[in-house]
Image (spheres, rainbow, N blue to C red):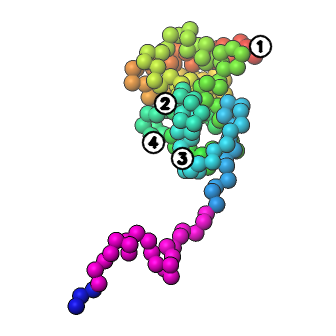
Amino acid sequence: MGPAPLRLEHCMSPPAEHPIPTAPTQRPPAPLAISVNGKPYYHDGDPAMPLLWFLRDRLRLTGAKYGCGVGVCGACMVLIDDKATPACMITMQVAANRKVITIEGLATDTLHPVQQAWIEEDVVLCGYCQSGQIIAAVDLLRRKPKPGDDDIASIGNLCRCGSYPRIRRAIARAADLMRNVKK
């Protein structure tokens, strides 16, 4: 005689003497605090989530764009503690307790001088890369108030439309605007 036939009730619930093992309970991670455009936020999800998804999907700040996903193109550039940083490469855990400024938070009551120069030089073609370009220019001008051509050319953000001559003129104009404001 072979084994007893399997009955449906055997498949539906385990016998009482053999409880189903459960996974050990884990505490959810503590919420991560982050300042975005001067406002406090908390992230209670996966600490490995890229900052870019938090900004776009949770806060609906869509100025930083997804481009390459590996921190090369610059479309997702934001300022983290006043330094231009690709948001696609920074996890929420790394961004925690830092100050993040996006293109949406760059202007206060008036346009930032870089934004003003962008308008005056009619830089935007398709516009996809422009928020990252502006953030990179703000960072450059913070570090080098009188940038030379080589300094401006060192910004590695990509522009598929080839608006580089306009971008360079706008950065030079923004440097002049910023110097004139300080006088």
Q: Distance between the residues labelled 1 and 3?
A: 43 Å
Q: How far apart are marks 4 and 1 (CA)?
A: 40 Å
Which residue lies at the image location 64% right of the left edge and 55% below the top edge?
29
Badge 4 is on which residue? 70
Q: Is 31 displayed left or right of 18 in the figure?
A: right
Q: Quadrant of residue 3?
A: bottom left
Main secondary structure type of the part rendered in magenta: loop
Which residue lies at the image location 57% right of the left edge and 36% below the top edge?
58
- Identify the disc placed on residue 183: 1
Rendered location of residue 87, percent (x, y): 55, 38
Q: How far apart are marks 2 and 4 (CA)?
A: 13 Å
Residue 158, compared with residue 46, is above or below; it is above
Q: What amino acid type is highlighted by mark number 1?
A: Lys
Residue 20, compared with residue 57, is above or below; it is below
Which marked residue is nearer to the observer: mark 4 or mark 1? 4
Badge 2 is on which residue? 65
N-term mark: 3 or 2: 3
For the magenta stretch, what is the residue range? Answer: 4-26
